[in-house]
Image (tube, rainbow, N blue to C red):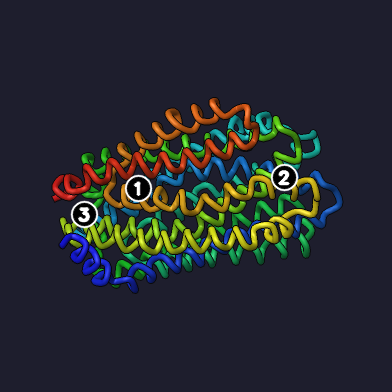
């Protein structure tokens, strides 16, 4: 009887609404690697490797700082979706204001502390004096995009929370396309070098902010939202919950980045060829996240709305429907990497030794989409339900209780040990979050009602 009801539930899912949310985000995510290719192409044609190295170092530090602020997008989406489900238009406006205020304050902090952040990053990553000079030139220009970049995260999360994935898609695509065009104009035509590449990103981010503001204004008109009095901008109980959720997501992101950074730094001990091969294969992981994140975003938005409306049935449908599509996409990705993985590696590097090393560890990448699809989806579920503490605890357990112990036990396997630890880490995230979800999800609905 349960089996029949499960199949009935599967066939009753509105798969079109899931794809309408997920596919625009997948397509917009694909604009990110194209931007990286354009950056590499325009800088790579300058006279000297220090220019490309400087952009790589400077953009790595910027990306790390901005990535840590990714909680602005994550926390906003789930809470806005809950307010949408509860038909609380006032709270929709308050969440936009509160999240934007947090983003603005963080951006101001980055600008005020840009010198210590930059110098620490240059020392940590290293490189020649010429590379560090170019990295500093890039970093100290690009850091001025912080207000726009962080506020764009808020606007992106707000639009996704309102189930407007198409607007969110255009926000990302237009920003990245402007960046690409300005890269060519500033670096190739005006010959402004590394500073031109950085300035292109700054201008693009502010253009994206203007476009995002227009999209938000359109949503105000469409949803009938109105400006609220200044005295109602801040509700301290809501702000406290938002800050707590942001804190938990930040700690979770730090753990995740720590594991990926450890793979890179530890792999460097096994030689340049292994280091380069790991870097190439981690690009596959970026592709995996771009695809699976689309359904995680869709699940986040749909779960948040169901929680806000205390809708048990649509909550289950959101999780089950996005899980099915995530598994399908993961299987397709694994097949793609199994059949064409070496061809992709050969496109990314001409070095024979690096290709050989990448081929040795490619089977781990083939397995990763299937092993990891559950944790991407569950991230969306937990964020949609604003369960930051549980997600943080699951990540801490997976990092400290699985990733590092497995690596320590597998040290004799050298680089294989790193990849075994990374795969085990992904499985641990699925199991820990899955166990919490199965035990607690009905209480999440009750707590929100």
Q: Is residue 138 visible?
A: no
Q: Where residue 357 is drawn, which disc sits there?
A: 2
Nearer-N-terminus badge (3/2): 3
In the image, taking residue 85 as reference, residue 411 lies left or right, namely right
Q: Where residue 307 is drawn, which disc sits there?
A: 3
* Residue at position x 46%, y 49% in the image: 371
Q: CA distance from mark 3 to mark 2?
A: 47 Å
Q: Measured along the vertical axis of the image, is residue 23 above or below residue 33?
A: below
Q: Nearer the viewer, residue 328 or 56?
A: 328
Q: Position of residue 258 (x, y in %)?
A: 52, 34
Identify the secondary structure beneath mark 2: helix
Nearer-N-terminus badge (1/2): 1
* Residue at position x 14%, y 48% in the image: 446
Q: Position of residue 109 (x, y in %)?
A: 48, 37
Q: Which-is-in-front pick, marks 1 and 3?
A: 3
Q: Nearer the viewer, residue 429 or 392?
A: 429
Q: Which-is-in-front pick, marks 1 and 2?
A: 2
Q: Nearer the viewer, residue 398 or 178?
A: 398
Identify the secondary structure beneath mark 3: helix
Nearer-N-terminus badge (1/3): 1
Q: Measured along the vertical axis of the image, is residue 393 above or below residue 334?
A: above
Whether residues under marks 1 and 3 lie with C-beta atoms below 8 angstroms apart, the answer is no
**Residue at the spot of label 1:** 75
Q: Position of residue 351 (x, y in %)?
A: 80, 50
């Amino acid at each position: 009887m349960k089996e029949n009801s499960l199949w009935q539930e599967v066939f009753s899912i509105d798969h079109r609404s899931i794809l309408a949310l997920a596919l625009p985000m997948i397509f917009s995510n694909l604009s990110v690697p194209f931007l990286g290719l354009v950056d590499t192409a325009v800088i790579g044609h300058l006279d000297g490797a220090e220019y490309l190295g400087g952009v790589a170092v400077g953009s790595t530090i910027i990306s790390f700082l901005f990535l840590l602020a990714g909680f602005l997008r994550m926390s906003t989406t789930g809470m806005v979706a809950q307010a949408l489900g509860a038909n609380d238009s006032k709270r929709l406006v308050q969440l936009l204001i509160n999240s934007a205020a947090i983003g603005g304050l963080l951006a101001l902090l980055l600008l005020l502390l840009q010198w210590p952040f930059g110098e620490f990053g240059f020392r940590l990553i290293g490189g020649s004096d010429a590379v560090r000079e170019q990295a500093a030139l890039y970093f100290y220009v690009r850091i001025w995009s912080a207000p726009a970049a962080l506020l764009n995260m808020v606007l992106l999360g707000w639009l996704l929370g309102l189930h407007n994935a198409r607007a969110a898609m255009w926000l990302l695509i237009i920003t990245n396309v402007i960046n690409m065009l300005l890269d060519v104009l500033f670096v190739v035509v005006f010959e402004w070098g590394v500073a031109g590449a950085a300035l292109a990103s700054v201008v693009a981010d502010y253009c994206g902010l203007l476009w995002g503001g227009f999209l938000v204004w359109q949503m105000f008109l469409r949803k009938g939202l109105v400006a609220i009095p200044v005295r109602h901008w801040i509700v301290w109980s809501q702000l406290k919950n938002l800050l707590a959720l942001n804190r938990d997501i930040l700690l979770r992101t730090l753990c995740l980045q720590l594991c990926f950074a450890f793979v890179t730094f530890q792999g460097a001990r096994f030689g340049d060829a292994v280091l380069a091969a790991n870097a190439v294969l981690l690009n596959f992981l970026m592709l995996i996240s771009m695809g699976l994140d689309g359904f995680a975003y869709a699940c986040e938005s749909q779960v948040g709305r169901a929680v806000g409306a205390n809708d048990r049935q649509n909550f289950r449908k959101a999780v089950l429907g996005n899980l099915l599509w995530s598994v399908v996409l993961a299987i397709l990705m694994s097949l793609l990497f199994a059949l064409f993985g070496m061809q992709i590696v050969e496109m990314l590097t001409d070095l024979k030794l690096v290709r050989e090393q990448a081929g040795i560890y490619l089977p781990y990448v083939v397995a990763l989409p299937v092993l990891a699809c559950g944790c991407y989806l569950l991230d969306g579920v937990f964020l949609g339900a604003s369960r930051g503490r549980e997600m943080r605890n699951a990540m801490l357990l997976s990092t400290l209780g699985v990733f590092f112990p497995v690596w320590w036990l597998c040290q004799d396997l050298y680089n294989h040990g790193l990849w075994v630890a990374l795969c085990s880490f992904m499985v641990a995230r699925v199991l820990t979050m899955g166990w919490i979800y199965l035990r607690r999800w009905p209480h999440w609905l009750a707590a929100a009602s």
